[in-house]
């Protein structure tokens, strides 16, 4: 990726008493959130999440923040604060800990339980955990941290106030301001106000929904819609939602009890996360409602509810496999109801509609965000953000967590409330807070780090470009044998193509021009096979482009005999 700010150079030395903010992910995209704070030579990290790849990154499993900027200074890291348990905030933690295992992790009970199950999968066992809750204050080196309850689409989310000699920073994490949340735990605006009175020097705020006017709809409004879907169904119901959305699962469990149905989870992450949420008391499972997925199949269809992963159309998820009729034991029947109780993350549209079409083709009634209120966002809309700015009255604002358009909209809201200094930054852009003023001072190296199977960071943007060309344009291989003594082509070219409706005979017309071009290059003194291969590549490349209007990957092989 080319850096969006070519005009910036490396940041200058951080002045004494200055606080440096280095975003390594999440500013410019929704995903892989990670922000580094530096004070007096010490570092504090807030969040370490993943980004899921889209159609432009074929074969990539995950995208991580780029740790390059701090890799040589991991010893200076005092702690990693995790604001909540969503993948875009905790998912890259094992990859960071692989580089230094004893970085202290700080977060709420549920957040740390969710991250701990990941660490165990990665066989990481030496990481110290500091469990905190709202109101707690704890110091790591020069960073004095205070935690504030925030309401979000996962329980136990926290905002963090960071006090250093440079002033007071408030980072909201992901939040919204549902005033009647299902668990009664609201965003603590009284704490926001108290911090505002003390004087917030830099306010980092969630930009995700800054373009959405008004207020995010309350979670409670979904209950009657779910109830209705249950009331109207006389067959099996499948509800797909995020594997971390404890409150949504709670709503489904409650509806199931009311309608005399039993529930089973399908999908590994759903089973694992809901066990954690139940054990810690965040999910209240009514007695007798849960059964194993295989037992559920023995019940009458009108008594079955499945809660499944795959609401984003992930191709290997339970729901996608059900839609393709290749799930081990869930076979959809005509008349079944499928509820997609989740948002549509930008970039996933095609995959989600593919799944919806697959389900509809099998005769299911599909209830989704497009035709019923079965999901509300987890993020504050413009109205809520305005309240926050008016309550906190920050000196400087740095919009975070969003694409560029979201961050610009968020900054605009801050300005409307009278915030004088709004600083815009993207991944890698360094912001210093010095003498109460925040400003962009430079940039650090910050690219995409791709995880592909077991490899981390080995796949580069140029290999992805090759994959895209292979996927979209196919490839053509050309083999030419050269007699190096006689100085001319002695056999070939042999041409094979894949990925297009080409017969090998389609290439007859270009064979002689390739021979001529190679012979000419040999006459002119080229003997290096690499140079001759470039001659072959150019000759056939131009021809394929002109005659077939395609740009396949061309693999020329020149062999000396
Ligand atoms: Zn979140
Ligand atoms: Zn997030």
Image (spheres, rainbow, N blue to C red):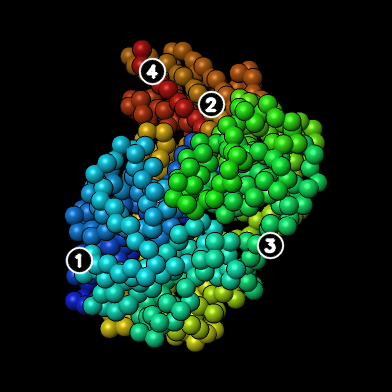
Badge 2 or badge 1: first in the primary sequence:
1
Residue drawn at (57%, 54%), measured in percent from left and top?
247
Q: Is mark 2 within 8 Å of ligand 2?
A: no
Relative to 477, does residue 56 appear above or below in the rendering? below
In front of the other: label 2 or label 3?
3
- Of labels 4 and 1, earlier in sequence is 1
- Callout 3 crowding tier (Cα within 10 Å): few <14, some 14–19, many ≥20: few
Q: Is mark 4 within 8 Å of ligand 2?
A: no
State the mark number for residue 517.
Answer: none
Residue 476: image tag? 2
Closest to the camera, between mark 4 and mark 2, is: 2
146 vs 101, nearest the viewer:
146
Q: Which residue is mark 1?
A: 141
Of the two numbered discs 4 and 2 on the same chain, state the one appearing first in sequence.
Answer: 2
The reply to whether dot 2 and dot 3 touch (C-beta < 8 Å) is: no
Q: CA distance from mark 4 to mark 1?
A: 63 Å
Please state which of the two labelled residues, at mark 4 or mark 1, is closer to the viewer: 1
Q: Is 321 in front, or is 552?
A: 321
| Secondary structure under the numbered disc 1 in the rendered image | loop
The total number of labels drawn is: 4
Q: Is residue 74 visible?
A: yes
Q: Quadrant of residue 364?
A: top right
Residue to which mark 4 is pinned: 559
Quadrant in which the C terminus appears: top left
């Amino acid at each position: 990726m080319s850096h969006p700010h070519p005009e910036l150079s490396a940041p200058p030395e951080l002045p004494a008493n200055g606080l440096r903010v280095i975003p390594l992910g999440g500013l410019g995209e929704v995903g892989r959130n990670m922000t580094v704070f530096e004070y007096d030579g010490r570092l504090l990290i807030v969040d370490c999440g993943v980004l899921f790849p889209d159609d432009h990154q074929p074969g990539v499993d995950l995208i991580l923040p780029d740790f390059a900027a701090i890799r040589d200074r991991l010893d200076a890291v005092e702690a990693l604060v995790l604001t909540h348990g969503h993948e875009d905030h905790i998912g890259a933690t094992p990859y960071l800990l692989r580089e230094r295992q004893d970085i202290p992790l700080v977060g709420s009970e549920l957040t740390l339980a969710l991250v701990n199950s990941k660490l165990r999968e990665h066989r990481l066992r030496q990481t110290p955990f500091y469990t905190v809750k709202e109101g707690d204050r704890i110091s790591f080196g020069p960073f004095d941290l205070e935690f504030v309850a925030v309401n979000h689409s996962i329980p136990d989310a926290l905002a963090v106030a960071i006090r250093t000699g440079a002033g007071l920073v408030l980072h909201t994490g992901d939040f919204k301001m549902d005033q009647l949340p299902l668990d009664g735990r609201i965003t603590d605006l009284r704490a926001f106000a108290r911090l505002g009175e003390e004087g917030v020097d830099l306010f980092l705020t969630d930009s995700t929904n800054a373009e959405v006017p008004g207020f995010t709809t309350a979670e409670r409004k979904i209950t009657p819609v779910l109830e209705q879907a249950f009331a109207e169904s006389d067959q099996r119901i499948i509800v797909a939602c995020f594997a971390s959305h404890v409150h949504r699962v709670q709503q489904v469990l409650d509806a199931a009890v009311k309608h005399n149905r039993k529930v089973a989870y399908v999908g590994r992450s759903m089973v694992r996360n809901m066990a954690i949420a139940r054990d810690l008391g965040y999910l209240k499972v009514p007695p007798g409602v849960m059964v194993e997925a295989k037992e559920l199949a023995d019940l009458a269809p009108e008594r079955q509810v499945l809660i499944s992963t795959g609401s984003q159309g992930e191709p290997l998820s339970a729901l996608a496999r059900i839609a393709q009729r290749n799930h081990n034991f869930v076979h959809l029947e005509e008349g079944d109801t499928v509820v997609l109780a989740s948002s549509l993350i930008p970039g996933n549209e095609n995959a989600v509609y593919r799944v919806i079409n697959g389900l509809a083709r099998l005769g299911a009634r599909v209830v989704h965000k497009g035709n019923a209120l079965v999901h509300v966002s987890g993020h504050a809309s413009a109205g809520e953000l305005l309240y926050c700015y008016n309550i906190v009255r920050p000196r400087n604002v740095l919009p975070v967590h969003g694409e560029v358009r979201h961050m610009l909209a968020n900054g605009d809201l801050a300005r409307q409330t009278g915030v004088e200094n709004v600083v815009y930054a993207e991944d890698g852009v360094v912001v210093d807070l010095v003498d109460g003023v925040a400003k962009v001072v430079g940039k650090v190296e910050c690219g995409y780090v791709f995880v592909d199977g077991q490899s981390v960071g080995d796949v580069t943007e140029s290999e992805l470009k090759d994959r895209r060309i292979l996927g979209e344009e196919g490839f053509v291989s050309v083999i030419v044998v050269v007699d190096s003594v006689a100085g001319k082509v002695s056999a070939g070219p042999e041409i094979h193509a894949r990925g297009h409706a080409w017969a090998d005979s389609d290439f007859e017309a270009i064979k002689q021009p390739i021979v001529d071009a190679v012979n000419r290059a040999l006459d002119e003194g080229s003997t290096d096979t690499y140079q001759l291969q470039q001659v072959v590549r150019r000759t056939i490349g131009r021809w394929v482009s002109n005659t077939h209007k395609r740009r396949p990957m061309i693999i020329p092989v020149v062999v000396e005999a």
